[in-house]
Amino acid sequence: MPNVRTTVVMFAAIACAWTVRAHAERVVLADAANLPASTSGVAGHLRAQTLLARANFSPGEIDGLAGSNQRRAVSGYQAAHDLPPTGELDADTWAALNKEAPAVVTAYTLTEQDVGQAFAKLPKDMMEQGKLGRLGFESIEEALGERFHASPALLRQLNPGTDFSRAGTQIQVPNVADIAALPKAAKVVVDKSDSTLTLLDADGKTIALFPVSSGSEHDPLPIGEWKIGSTAVDPTFHYNPALFWDSDPKHAKAKLAAGPNNPVGTRWIDLSKPHYGLHGTPTPSSVGKRQSHGCVRLTNWDVERLAAAVGPSVPVVMQE
């Protein structure tokens, strides 16, 4: 058993480690707010992802980590700005992204409405979910992540030691709340090989690009040209286990309530192909990384922007 002095030293070391960690995380925030000397590391990736989102080339969930969605967004941005589409944050791309760039992190004060939501852990089983009146957020961090397009882990890193449950608390978040609405699109292209959805104007110019999950071996993406139908806001989900190859054989049909954790998220954009649509997701971190059941899945914030930019009869090309 350690003696008193040893115990005191141990606690002092732990306290020192936490202090160093908190200081390091605050440095990350300060570096991202300014212009990082390097595009690598959390500060560089946080800055890049936020600026890409503001430029309408979505990295999906902003997490401060280099990954496939960031690479897709960078490549799309480069192609649209006459830069070699390498997917890498080279000097020319970095300079273009940062030209007249606003702050990439901003302060937000938690409100009574934020902290007063009914948070509850949701069951994973579809039949159990069907018994609930709403499929809402499981935590305040998840709710704030949806609002600011960020992973809960990144929000905690930006705000070390912060109590997110107290109204009046000021936190630091990615600066994405004031992104302007997209212009109306003339065409949608879903690219299976690149896991992207691109909005084009009448001249074929890229308006926006989003990462997507699109189909699987069991439920392949329906290659061809379809058309946009109607859009459902905060849709319910009619679960039919017969349409899912991996469903529980004991399951029956069920109607799942609306909410951000509904299986199709906060928007369903119907397609002329029966049973297929463009929709949101309860797991934004999985977009572009896990397969879907044939439909095209986006983060909730991206599908909401998409829904506002398309209307009935807009063509949707799904290609290999």
Image (spheres, rainbow, N blue to C red):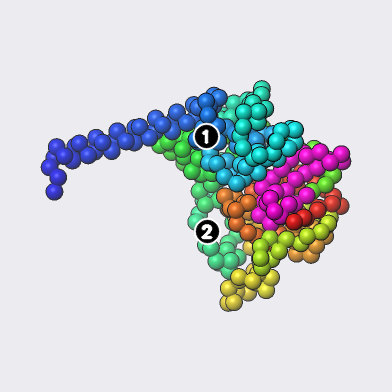
Rendered image quadrant of residue 249 = bottom right
Identity of the residue drawn at 59% across and 50% down? 284
State whether residue 102 is above or below residue 268: above
Residue 220, quarter of the rendered image? bottom right
Viewer-proximal residue, 232 or 94? 94
In depth, the one of 82 and 141 nearer the eye is 82
Mark 1 neighbour class, 10 Å CA radius: few under 14, some 14 to 19, many 20 or more: some
Could you tell me if the residues under marks 2 and 1 are in contact, i.e. CB atoms within 8 Å?
no
Residue at 50% across / 40% down in the picture?
154
Secondary structure under badge 2? loop
Location of mark 2 (residue): 122
Q: Nearer the viewer, mark 2 or mark 1?
A: 1
Instruction: Give the SS element for disc 1.
Output: loop
Q: Quote the CA–CA distance across marks 2 and 1.
A: 36 Å
Quickly name the residue at label 1.
Answer: 40
The image position of residue 215, as x and y in percent, is: 68, 60
**183, above or below 316, in the image:** above
Which amino acid, by three-letter code, is at mark 1? Ser
* Residue segment shown in magenta: 189-214
Residue 230 visible in the picture: no
Relative to 28, 84 lies left or right: right
Whichever of callouts 2 and 1 sits on the residue coming sooner in the sequence is 1
Magenta span dominant secondary structure: strand
Residue 166 position in % (x across, y down) = 46, 38
Q: Nearer the viewer, residue 31 or 271?
A: 31
Percent x, y for residue 22? 39, 33
